[in-house]
Each structure stands twice: as structure tokens, then as C-alpha cells.
Image (cartoon, rainbow, N blue to C red):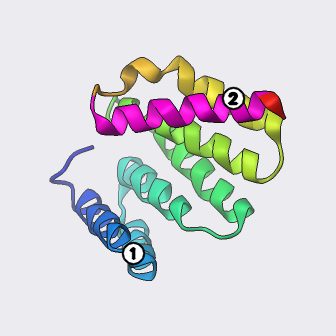
């Protein structure tokens, strides 16, 4: 993600609020990011973060699907490294809705793109979450 992008900056503020346990404030930042996003790149990022704090799994799935839809509409590689996380979160949404087969399908899509993840803490967290999701969905 482009750290200088204004929508990314708003989402970073949301992440910081989350880290401090201020979930309502984080949700407000993510809503602001969605409302101010222009273009599919920014909308993809904002939708991804909108999904994070949804109590209703149907709404969570909606936002994760919106993030994927926006990513897929881009004609460049700007979000290529984001796909494992997008698929992971979409899989998790299906898992929360009790659709283990669809959850497994998305977790496997995430696993197929795992090489796009950086070799850092974030990448390791996503790799581990993908492996755990596949394990859970396979056992259901």
C-alpha cells in the first residue's frame, strides 16, 4: 500500500485506534476512509478495513466481497500483495456464516498466492492465519 495515500493514512489512524482499544474511533476512521475514497484502489483498502469491525457476519462478508471486487477491477499490480489477506478475510466471513466449503475455497486461494506476502511480521501473521483457516475448514 502507498503510505502517502490519504485513504491509507486514515486507515492507519484506524489501526492505531484499534491498537489502543478504541474500536468505535477505529470504525469512524474506516467509515471516513470509505466515504472519502476515490477510485478502486482506495475503495479496496477502505472496504477491507470496513469489514474488520462488523458484528453481523453477512455485513462482514459484504465488505470483504466489496474489497475483492474493487481489487479485481484494478488494471495494475497496486494491490497484488494484498490478495492473500483479501482471500483470507473472505474465507473467514464464510466460516463465520457456517459455509465451511466456501471458507476452505477462499483459504486455498489465499494459500496459492502466499508468495506475494512480504517476509515480515505481517506476512507471517497472514501465513499463519491461512494455515489455521485451512485446518479449521478442512475439519468441519
- Is 128 inside the magenta-drawn segment? yes
Q: Is residue 17 above or below residue 135?
A: below
* Residue most extreme to the left: 4
Q: Which residue is mark 2?
A: 135
Disc 2 vs disc 1: Cβ atoms closer than 8 Å?
no
Residue indicated by mark 1: 21
Q: Residue at x 49, y 57 (%)?
A: 47
Viewer can see residue 110: yes
Total count of labels: 2
Task: Name the secondary structure under disc 2.
Answer: helix
Tell me which residue sits at (43%, 55%) in the image. Answer: 43
- Quarter-wise, where is residue 29 in the image? bottom left
Start-end of magenta stretch = 120-138
Q: Name the quadrant containing residue 132.
A: top right
- The foreground one among 110 and 138 is 138
Give me the C-alpha separation between circle 2 and circle 1.
29 Å
Q: In the image, 139: left or right of 15?
A: right
From the viewer's perspective, is residue 126 above or below residue 110?
A: below
- Name the residue rendered at 21%, 46% in the picture: 2
Horizontal arrangement in the rendering, residue 1 relative to residue 84 (left or right): left
Left or right placement of residue 101 versus residue 67 in this view: right
Q: Which quadrant: the C terminus?
A: top right
Residue 71 at x, y percent in the picture: 47, 40
Percent position of residue 135, x then y: 69, 29
Instruction: Tell me the crowding category of disc 2: few under 14, some 14 to 19, or many 20 or more residues within 10 angstroms, Cα based.
Output: few
Residue 14: percent from the left, percent from the top?
34, 68
**Crowd class of label 1 (few under 14; some 14 to 19; many from 20; radius 10 Å):** few
Amino acid at each position: 500500500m502507498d503510505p502517502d495515500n490519504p485513504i491509507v493514512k486514515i486507515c492507519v489512524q484506524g489501526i492505531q485506534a484499534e491498537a489502543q482499544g478504541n474500536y468505535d474511533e477505529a470504525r469512524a476512521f474506516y467509515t471516513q476512509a470509505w466515504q472519502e475514497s476515490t477510485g478502486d484502489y482506495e475503495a479496496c483498502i477502505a472496504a477491507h478495513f470496513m469489514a474488520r469491525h462488523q458484528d453481523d457476519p453477512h455485513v462482514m462478508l459484504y465488505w470483504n466481497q466489496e474489497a475483492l471486487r474493487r481489487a479485481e477491477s484494478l488494471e495494475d499490480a497496486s494491490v497484488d500483495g494484498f490478495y492473500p489477506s483479501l482471500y483470507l478475510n473472505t474465507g473467514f466471513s464464510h466460516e463465520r456464516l457456517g459455509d465451511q466449503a466456501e471458507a476452505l475455497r477462499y483459504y486455498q486461494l489465499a494459500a496459492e498466492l502466499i508468495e506475494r506476502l512480504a517476509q515480515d511480521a505481517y506476512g507471517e501473521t497472514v501465513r499463519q492465519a491461512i494455515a489455521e483457516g485451512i485446518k479449521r475448514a478442512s475439519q468441519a
